[in-house]
Image (spheres, rainbow, N blue to C red):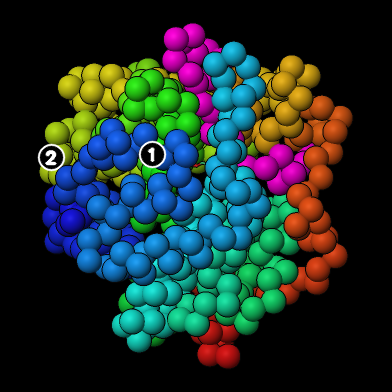
Amino acid sequence: MRYVSTRGQAPALSFEETMLTGLARDGGLYVPESVPTLSEDAIRRMAWGSYEDAAFEVMWPFVGDTFTEDEFRELIANAYDGFGHVSRAPLKQVGDGQWLLELFHGPTLAFKDFAMQLIGQMFQHVLARRGDRITIVGATSGDTGSAAIEAFRGLDNVDVCILYPHGRVSEVQRRQMTTPVESNVHALAVDGTFDDCQRHLKDMFADDTFRDEVGLAAVNSINWARVLAQVVYYFTSAASLGAPKRKVSYTVPTGNFGDIYAGEIARRMGLPIDRLVIATNQNDILDRALREAEYRTGDVKPSISPSMDIQVSSNFERLLFDAYDRDGGAVAQIMDELRSGGRFKISQGAIDAIREGFASGSVSEAETLERIAVTQTEAQELVCPHTAVGLEVAADHHDIRVPMITLATAHPAKFPDAVEKATGIRPPLPKRMADLYDRSERVTQVANDLSALEEVIQEKRAK
Ligand SMILES: *Cc1c(COP(=O)(O)O)cnc(C)c1O
């Protein structure tokens, strides 16, 4: 299996190279040259097989000769071993034909663990074989950083440095980043905003000397391997509701379009998905793009579902690539327009193709709180604000003949303030991490300055 860039200029790569590279050299994102399909029998078996077996079935055709079959099975087993639920991604009914897919039983209580835990295992395996050592640097507004730290802690061939805005992440998120004791983990609290952190990260990648010296690598949401790991739970959930014989639809709380794009890959692999519904908070660029056929950025408005507060939805480029019939030149051109003017028009052919498979909706702050409250009274479930955004949009798009599954992207205890505000109940942490508030923290505070950050990173990894 080869991977090509959405902008058509970068060389095609293997799975291993794609995973280690992340972003293509022409600024595009890597996508598989073609998408394999799974047999109906293979899908049917997932209704009673283990999550790990399904993960192998779904991902194996994509990884090429990067691993042997036995190696890949072992990496998958290690990745999901630490999850707090036997089925990894359990389904729960919350109404007539309405289901929640709980993706928060991983070590940091958000769906990002599904991809990050596996990426940690795959990176370690590949780097050990190559005899390489790298430094993963990430900028986070919360969930990605903690998931990356959990995934890479204690691995031999990787240092992980996470930049977060000092004083601007929730206490649970901060503690998840600052309490791991392993010496290859470095939490860096930057005196600035999340945007500052992201800008410094970009500048580090543009600094060739620094980049080569520390072996800089990234595991942000555009990494193909992350998308791939998320395809699996669409299969397991649909199979348990009767696929391939019965259709299902999904509503996905969306920021960078990674999680929902994984659903699109599942559909192309032969899973009978009727609709994929994009759910956004008040940062509604994707909902507007679908309605108006124009992609137009604005200012980020901070919300109570902060993991979806984005201006530019990176993975949407992958969908556009297909909607433009895989014309990399056309995608490069609209992305240039976006960079220079903050907007581009989506062509009639492309928007028609997108609307055939996707619907969308956006949700205000008040509606989000109201949905948390209603879900508690009607279904006795506490849900996180991101999940509530999904449920609110799902209610508008539910076709009674097709089960609707909403992705529950984080545990309510990760966002206790919003949940308490809506319901009066403060959700407790799961037992296995109840001592999070008692563990001691280790963090380095750094000035909002590129060279100060580079110096700290060099110093940390040298130890
Ligand atoms: C990252 C995140 C999202 C958004 O996922 P994308 O793949 O960026 O669309 C939604 N909810 C939670 C809790 C998240 O951490």
Residue 437 occupies quadrant: bottom right
- Residues at marks 1 and 2 touching, judged by CB atoms closer than 8 Å: no
Structural distance between the alpha carbons of marks 1 and 2? 37 Å
Tell me if residue 69 can be seen.
Answer: yes
Q: Image check: 46 left or right of 443?
A: left
Instruction: Label 2: state its secondary structure.
Output: loop
Question: Is the residue marked by circle 2 packed among few (<14), some (14-19), or many (20+) residues within 10 Å?
Answer: some
The residue under the point 30% across, 55% down is: 60
- Total count of labels: 2
**Element under disc 1:** helix
Residue stretch in magenta: 394-417
Does residue 10 appear in this view? no
Dot 1 corresponds to which residue? 45
Residue nearest the observer in this picture, 160 or 78: 78
Residue underneath mark 2: 327
In the image, which disc is placed on residue 238? none
Residue 23, how many percent across, how many down?
31, 58
Relative to 216, say whether 25 is above or below: above
Amino acid type, label 1: Arg
Which x, y percent locates residue 198?
A: 49, 58
Is 239 within the magenta?
Answer: no
Q: Residue at x 24, y 19 (%)?
A: 352
Please check the rendered image and state whether residue 398 is part of the magenta-colored stretch, yes or no. yes
